[in-house]
Image: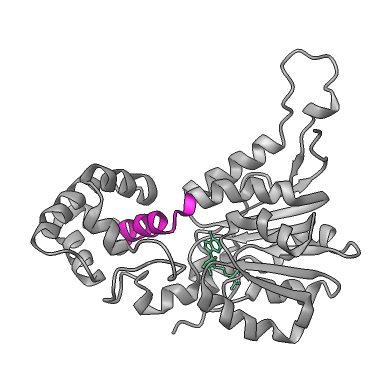
Amino acid sequence: MSNDRHVPVMLQRCLDMLAPALERPGAVVVDCTLGLGGHSEALLQRFPEVRLVALDRDKEALRLSGERLAPYGERATLVHAVYDELPEVLDRLGIPKVDGVLFDLGVSSMQLDEADRGFAYAQDAPLDMRMDQTTGISAAEVLNTYPAGELVRILRAYGEEKQAKRIVSAVVREREKEPFTNSARLVELIRDSLPQAAKRTGGNPAKRTFQALRIEVNRELDSVEKAIPAAVKALAVGGRVAVLSYQSLEDRIVKQVFAAGAATTAPPGLPVVPEKYQPRLQLLTRGAELPTEEEVAENRRAAPARLRGAQRIREDVL
Ligand SMILES: C[S@@+](CC[C@H](N)C(=O)[O-])C[C@H]1O[C@@H](n2cnc3c(N)ncnc32)[C@H](O)[C@@H]1O
């Protein structure tokens, strides 16, 4: 087990970013990606009056964090849900508006460390990769059943894999002989199907394919696309949202949603911009903020992190 297993990414910066919103009386914060509860616990500690609602789609994460956050009693409400269900969750809890929302996207260190979940390419394990093991299809099913063209699209779009065609033709050839069940066979196949030059370009050559399968299995980008606007909508005026993403496609979605919220929607040429066209959001980050070199040196999983934040400055005008 690596010693960076439980270290929450860009923690201090996330807390500082949310602070002006969470220091208000009666503040509610939603942690949309509870994981092992590192950020959530820090939120409860730093803001002693705050009420936390925390979501995760992974029941094992909820069980472990439930134990960790038990000392905070009723201040913490943990919910098994995907984060695009945020509006329904808040509705059920009778919470009309919230003051802060945090997303720490991607896969948790626990999911990566538990070999039998099939996220890691370094150990042989069943090709599962579902964050919620009670529903959905596994990575093996994607690999064994998707048409070749669809697999190429996924590897290119979600893995930024330049050798997608080569890998997919090898997959299709091999799956006809015998369906894939385990990660080691896929890792070996990828290694064998790549030209020498591609094998030398940084890290394990299976990394991009594994990332792509994981994003497809968990429909991660669809979820992010729905969830970030829903989070913005749930914010009270003055409320803040902070999003940590770990790959460029996710970060691009966050950037676009925030930029759209921070722009006026007025048709060009109006001498005065009426209230209904005024921006709903103010950006709290210029571009994306990165972890410091010190943090990356201590926690290599922080390396790809990109943090963006925004503040709600106006109600929706109906
Ligand atoms: C990077 S981890 C969060 C780590 C956490 N911040 C901590 O300090 O321990 C991301 C978590 O988000 C969860 N997750 C990913 N996609 C989700 C979704 N669509 N809905 C709810 N939870 C999701 C994963 O199961 C995982 O536990």
Q: Is residue 1 above or below residue 226?
A: below
Quarter of the image containing the C terminus? top right
Whether residue 194 is visible to the viewer of this picture, yes or no, is no
Q: Is residue 267 above or below residue 277?
A: above
- The structure residue drawn at horizontal position 65% and vertical position 37%, both measured from the top left corner, is 259
Location of residue 174 in the rendering, given as x and y in whole percent from the top left corner: 12, 59
Q: Quadrant of ligand 1?
A: bottom right
Location of residue 243 in the rendering, given as x and y in whole percent from the top left corner: 63, 55
Location of residue 192 in the rendering, given as x and y in whole percent from the top left corner: 14, 60
**Circle count:** 0
Which residue is farthest front? 92
Location of residue 269 in the rendering, given as x and y in whole percent from the top left corner: 76, 12
State left or right for residue 318 relative to residue 53: right
Q: Is residue 208 above or below residue 129?
A: above
Quarter of the image containing the N terminus? bottom left
Q: Which quadrant holds residue 88? A: bottom right
**Residue 243 forms part of the magenta stretch:** no
**Residue 218 forms part of the magenta stretch:** yes
Q: Main secondary structure of the magenta part?
A: helix
- The structure residue drawn at horizontal position 47% and vertical position 54%, both measured from the top left corner, is 220
- The structure residue drawn at horizontal position 71% and vertical position 63%, both measured from the top left corner, is 30
Which residue is farthest right? 25
The span shown in magenta is: 207-221
Q: How is the image coloured?
A: one colour
Given residues 92 and 97, the one toward you in this image is: 92
Whether residue 220 is visible to the viewer of this picture, yes or no, is yes
- The structure residue drawn at horizontal position 25% and vertical position 50%, both measured from the top left corner, is 146
Q: Which quadrant holds residue 49? A: bottom right
